[in-house]
Amino acid sequence: MFNRVFGPLFAAPPQPENVSVVEAAVIKGWVASGEAVLVDVREAREFEAEHIPGATSVPLSAFDPARLPALKGRKLVIHCRSGSRCGMAAIRLATAGFDAPIHRMQGGLIGWKSVGGKTTTG
């Protein structure tokens, strides 16, 4: 009721847009064209064992929005193994005042591979 009378005290943080791995071709196109930055929030050892080519590792255990690569007008796509940790990363981004659109890849790396998405090691 308070918000209806006086308006919200705080602006709602931006909600991440879920991008289905079925749209993997769209995400691949974004990354290939430089239209998006792909951030993997799994731990470093997981990233070294297998990751999506072109992804940047920013582990959730030490997640700091300041460590994200510069977006410069590009989309931010975050992912993890199955989709849970990237949700926590999205909350941290919103809490830190990150105001650019956040695209959260549903299904994570597992979903990516299930639709034929390629991975690499190292």
Image (cartoon, rainbow, N blue to C red):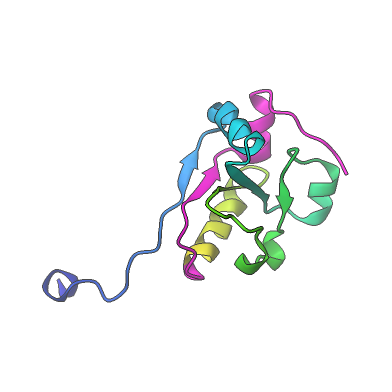
In which quadrant will I find the C terminus? top right
**Residue at point 59% right, 38% down?**
107
Is residue 64 shown in magenta? no
Number of dots carrying numbers? 0
**Residue at point 71% right, 59% down?**
59
Q: Is residue 84 left or right of residue 120?
A: left
Image: 70 above or below 23: below
Percent of width and height locating residue 50: 81, 40
Image: 118 above or below 15: above
- From which residue to which does the magenta span run? 95-122
In which quadrant will I find the N terminus? bottom left
**Residue at point 47% right, 64% down?**
94
**Residue at point 58% right, 36% down?**
30
Seen from the viewer's position, the closer of residues 102 and 48 is: 102
Question: Which residue is the extreme one toward the top?
Answer: 116
Percent of width and height locating residue 73: 52, 52
Seen from the viewer's position, the closer of residues 66 and 95 is: 66
Image: 36 above or below 41: above
Percent of width and height locating residue 95: 48, 69
Percent of width and height locating residue 60: 67, 60
Indicate the quadrant where residue 120 lies: top right
Is residue 108 shown in magenta? yes
Indicate the quadrant where residue 52 lies: top right
Question: Which residue is the extreme one toward the right?
Answer: 122
Seen from the viewer's position, the closer of residues 112 and 33 is: 33
